[in-house]
Image (cartoon, helix red, strand yellow):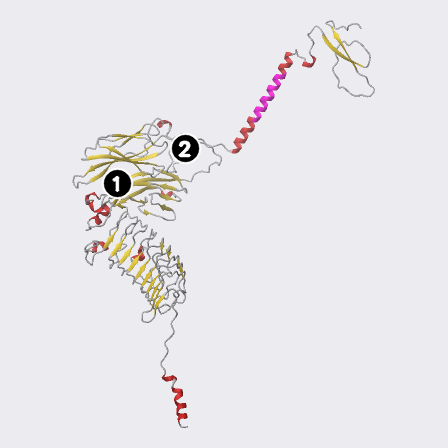
Amino acid sequence: MAVLPLLLCLLPLAPASSPPQPATSSPCPRRCRCQTQSLPLSVLCPGAGLLFVPPSLDRRAAELRLADNFIAAVRRRDLANMTGLLHLSLSRNTIRHVAAGAFADLRALRALHLDGNRLTSLGEGQLRGLVNLRHLILSNNQLAALAAGALDDCAETLEDLDLSYNNLEQLPWEALGRLGNVNTLGLDHNLLASVPAGAFSRLHKLARLDMTSNRLTTIPPDPLFSRLPLLARPRGSPASALVLAFGGNPLHCNCELVWLRRLAREDDLEACASPPALGGRYFWAVGEEEFVCEPPVVTHRSPPLAVPAGRPAALRCRAVGDPEPRVRWVSPQGRLLGNSSRARAFPNGTLELLVTEPGDGGIFTCIAANAAGEATAAVELTVGPPPPPQLANSTSCDPPRDGDPDALTPPSAASSSAKVADTVAPTDRGIQVTEHGATAALIQWPDQRPIPGIRMYQIQYNSSADDILVYRMIPADSRSFLLTDLASGRTYDLCLLAVYEDSATGLTATRPVGCSRFSTEPALRPCAAPHAPFLGGTMIIALGGVIVASVLVFIFVLLLRYKVHGGQPPGKAKATAPVSSVCSQTNGALGPAPTAPAPEPAVSRAHTVVQLDCEPWGPSHEPAGP
């Protein structure tokens, strides 16, 4: 009996001495392999035919591989509470949409693979929360837009960024410039046409930059490149060198790429796409002396303009050169003009004053500049008083107003015999233009003996109706050239350049010989079409005239017939035959009828007998016997 109390005392102590049970883990998703026996935990589901992220994921997993499936979207709840996830692979799925904040809980994530999907854009909230991300792979998507704040949360930690094989035409270069720890930057196989100067200057740890197969015509020098001892020998380069790949771009090999040509390279396959003389040549085989630029030459500027106050005015300036010059405008007061509430400056060199004021008049200066120099031209603008009101129904054939910068004023009677109307005096080198009709012009210039080693002349011209520049190459011994296929009624700006060999440098150079502006004879301008009321009145008058003429002809015919019958109506004319038959009307009695009575309307009456007796009527007008 003493044993029973002892057992009752020990019974409450039994549960306290038992070992703790392990916590239950989430089941492994179907078609996946899960490593849960040891840390770190991993969930592997490659090629499992998944249509969405499995909902029964172990939230303690450190590695999640969902590549080669058919996942179309990543939702906000798919990866929630996976705070220990270090590696996430979603490669080669069909992802079109990533919800904002879908990765917000993945604060420990180091690598994110989203390559081989169908993303078209990446916004500012889709990568939010990835504060420890080091590798971001976005290649082989359809990205056309990357938001400026898309990489803000991982800008300080990102080491590897791959944006290759997308449709990017522009990039947030300022945001990329803040990736201070990036080591590899892949921008190849996109649609990038330009890179701003200094875009990579703050990427001090950059070791590989790939810009292969874009649309780059030039690569601006960058302070990062000048600090490196050697540029991009892919094999055997020191650790401090930058591997730069830029093949497959339509490079324009002029003086802007001399800095790149001077760098040491061995086995890249870059080639020049332009200018024509260097097109298709191996970039590293072109000598530095062949990377030349041409200074700007102003080929077209607006003639002096006169516009009434309150009207718009457009000042035009065109220039050619290599590289393409940038055109700027300076006001008569010396201020640099740009886009404002009253003016707009266009990239093609046009300055538009939206509403002119009396104080806007003066000499505007057009400045065309490129890497080889600059050229200037002056355009005079006169602002007059406001125009008087005009009649709305005017149909005159007046010449166009001077305020229209593209209008051509027909030649006056005093100058109508002239073939060419020079609106701008030629330059000091004496270029002469003589037109021989409305579609041809003869250009003449003096001997250019002061320029040694002339190889050829080049004529550049365009019309006021378009911006297409036409080139003509002329032998060096020529002193004139006949331009044909010109359009009538247009103003042409023409410049002549001498192409010669510079004895000091041995390079091919150009020197302007002179410029001129001429106008072909304008075609006859048709008058304005008459208004509808005028046309209606004309038609009414014409129809009335036709009717009146018809009535007059009818009356004339009647008068002619009356005159032919001796002044008597045709029904009462005298008989001229010797014997005729006369019918008389009686009521049953016979009697002579000396004359033929006028016929009367026949009236039908009851019990009336009408007898018609026809007797011969002799010349003596006497009745014959019974």
Whether residue 469 sits left or right of residue 394 in the image: it is left
Quadrant into which the N terminus falls = bottom left
Quadrant into which the C terminus falls = top right
Q: Which corner quadrant of the image does residue 293 belong to?
A: top left
Asked whether the viewer can see residue 381, the reply is yes
Nearest the viewer among 275 and 80 is 80
Provide the major secondary structure of the magenta segment. helix
Asked whether the viewer can see residue 451, the reply is no
Q: Residue furthest bottom?
A: 1
Q: Residue at x 61, y 17 (%)?
A: 556
Nearest the viewer among 3 and 281 is 3
N-term-proximal mark, 2 vs 1: 1
Whether residue 339 sits left or right of residue 225 in the image: it is right
According to the picture, the residue beneath numbered tag 2 turns out to be 399
Q: What amino acid type should be assigned to the residue bearing mark 2?
A: Pro
Q: Position of residue 563 (x, y in %)?
A: 64, 12
Q: Position of residue 133 (x, y in %)?
A: 31, 63
Range shown magenta: 543-558
Is residue 51 found inside the magenta-colored segment of the image? no
Q: Position of residue 403 (x, y in %)?
A: 39, 38
According to the picture, the residue beneath numbered tag 1 turns out to be 276
Q: Position of residue 26 (x, y in %)?
A: 39, 70
Q: Residue furthest left?
A: 504
Q: Which corner quadrant of the image does residue 590 belong to?
A: top right
